[in-house]
Amino acid sequence: MLIETKGLRKTFRARKGNVEAVRGVDLSVKEGEIFGFLGPNGAGKTTTLRMLSTLLEPTGGSARVAGADLLKEPAQVRRQIGYVGQSGGTWGEVTAREELVMQGRLYEMGKTAARERAVEVIEAFELSEFADRKVKTYSGGQRRRLDVALGTVHQPSLLFLDEPTTGLDPQARAHMWDEIKKLRERGTAVFITTHYLDEADALCDRLAIIDHGEIVTEGTPIELKRQIAGDIVLVGVNGAAAKAVALLEPAEYVREVQTDEPDPTGVTLLRLYVENGSAAVPEILRALDRAEVTISSMELHRPSLDDVFLRQTGRSLRESD
Ligand SMILES: Nc1ncnc2c1ncn2[C@@H]1O[C@H](COP(=O)(O)OP(=O)(O)OP(=O)(O)O)[C@@H](O)[C@H]1O
């Protein structure tokens, strides 16, 4: 295991009372995998990441990261890992090549070695087009790619990326995903935080979902989606939500019903977890029609990671964006 944590905790002491940002997290990340850490704003993702990368001291618990004890041997951990924060640390007045060389020097490489390593990294991350221009002239996507490239200069076995694609346009995001996959191909494990479900689904070998400082579920994207066997039927009803729920909840073709708050037009969305969507839809239509409940919309869909999140926490991940 490249990361193994036991009961990792962080409590921030604040004037208005303590904030239990991370409340006992057990995680394991394997060599060479892309591990996704997913959760809404304020869930504790950055705090966990900063603890695992030695930037923040845990309040409790223990962890081994890249073969060393996080609390007893932080310097050893630091040598093995790379960290790319949310805002990025690039200055603007220097070029990518200069920054890469400086980063190498920071990791105690000689001048020639640092220059050679910069050339390799520029090639690996396809930065050559703009590597000799000042960073302040870069697009958001180019700057983010440089941030990630900087994190790999000392060839870490594990790279921490805090929301690497937030704020990027779809093309730049796709490019970043390719870069992250290439890191895995070269044997670097990647621990990535995100609140994009499609990103976690497309990119991660395994992921954990954190909410209110606690892990709510963990597994491969497929395993997590399988937790929600069957289909989901979304039914919008106008006004008579309670009546519809009372009618559908006991039906043998419905496993579970969840109800959203009514939208401004008075439509309530019912989320029906069913065994077989195409068999359930006509039954649902008939039952609501018989009870004279007006249906404003109906939709059948396959479970997504958002549904997993919703099932676990009662909230949609998207609502928290
Ligand atoms: N230095 C601090 N002092 C007090 N509270 C803090 C501090 N840093 C973080 N917190 C709180 O700890 C909780 C977890 O924050 P954290 O930044 O880890 O969340 P996050 O999941 O990374 O969110 P986001 O997606 O918005 O980055 C939040 O309630 C936050 O306000």
Image: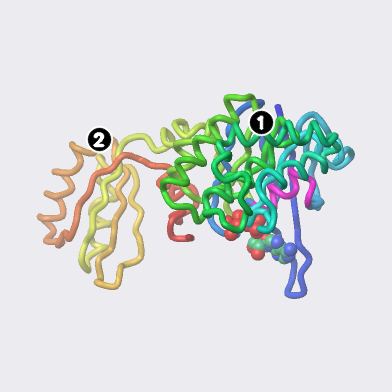
Which residue is painted at 63% across and 51% down in the image? 45
* Residue nearer the viewer, 259 or 33: 33
Instruction: Please state, as top left, top right, bottom left or bottom right, where the N terminus lies in the image.
Output: top right
Residue 275 lies, with reference to residue 238, above or below; the image says above
Which residue is painted at 26% across and 46% down in the image? 233
From the top left corner, tell me how far across and down residue 308 is, in percent.
Answer: 44, 44
Color encoding of the figure: rainbow
Task: Please identify the residue farthest to the bottom as the structure is shown.
Answer: 16
Residue marked by disc 2: 276
* Residue nearer the viewer, 139 or 257: 139
From the top left corner, tell me how far across and down residue 161 is, in percent.
Answer: 63, 44
**Amino acid type at mark 1:** Glu
Q: Tags 2 and 1 in contact by the CB under 8 Å rule? A: no
Confirm whether residue 119 shows in the render.
Answer: yes
Confirm whether residue 212 shows in the render.
Answer: no
Q: Is residue 2 left or right of residue 77?
A: left
**Cα–Cα gap, marks 2 and 1:** 53 Å
Task: Please identify the residue farthest to the front as the structure is shown.
Answer: 132
Tag 2 secondary structure: loop
Magenta stretch contains residue 249 = no
From the top left corner, tell me how far across and down residue 196 is, in percent.
Answer: 47, 49
From the top left corner, tell me how far across and down residue 151 is, in percent.
Answer: 69, 41
Residue 250 lies, with reference to residue 124, above or below; the image says below
Determine which of the numbered discs, if any, sits on residue 120 in the image. Answer: 1
**Amino acid type at mark 2:** Asn
* Residue nearer the viewer, 130 or 164: 130
User: Which of pointers 2 and 1 indicates the residue nearer the eye?
Assistant: 1
Tag 1 secondary structure: helix
Extent of the magenta region: 46-55
Residue 261 lies, with reference to residue 257, above or below; the image says below
Q: Quadrant of ligand 1?
A: bottom right
Q: Main secondary structure of the magenta part?
A: helix
